[in-house]
Image (spheres, helix red, strand yellow):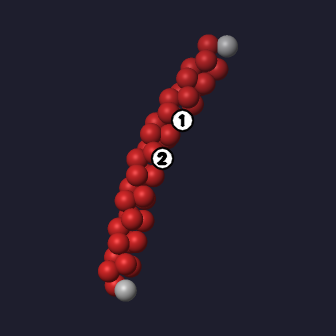
């Protein structure tokens, strides 16, 4: 019983860290897009 709880907790943790990596990548792309939009906006 406790073994399966431990395994599922580890699974959730692994998924969370993986998702955090994806979120960090998306945030990086998002910031670049916003920066580019601001730059283009300043040009116009």
Q: Position of residue 30 (x, y in %)?
A: 54, 35
Point 38% across, 72% down: residue: 9
Residue annotated with mark 2? 23
Point 50% across, 40% down: residue: 26
Does residue 25 sit above or below 34 in this rendering? below
Does residue 15 sit above or below 30 in this rendering? below
Q: Quadrant of the N terminus?
A: bottom left
**Which numbered disc covers residue 30?**
1
Which secondary structure, mark 2?
Answer: helix
Q: Quadrant of the C terminus?
A: top right
Does residue 31 sit above or below 42 in this rendering? below
Taking depth in this image into account, of 32 and 40 the one nearest to the observer is 32
Point 60% across, 24% down: residue: 37
**Which numbered disc covers residue 10?**
none
For this view, does 26 lie left or right of residue 6?
right
> Quarter-wise, where is residue 11 in the image?
bottom left
How dense is the environment of label 1, judged by Cα within 10 Å: few (below 14), some, or many (20 and up)? few
Q: Position of residue 4 (x, y in %)?
A: 37, 78
How dense is the environment of label 2, judged by Cα within 10 Å: few (below 14), some, or many (20 and up)? few
């Amino acid at each position: 019983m406790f073994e399966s709880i431990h395994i599922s907790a580890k699974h959730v943790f692994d998924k969370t860290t993986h998702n955090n990596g994806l979120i960090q990548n998306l945030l990086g792309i998002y910031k670049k897009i916003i920066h580019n939009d601001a730059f283009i906006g300043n040009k116009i």
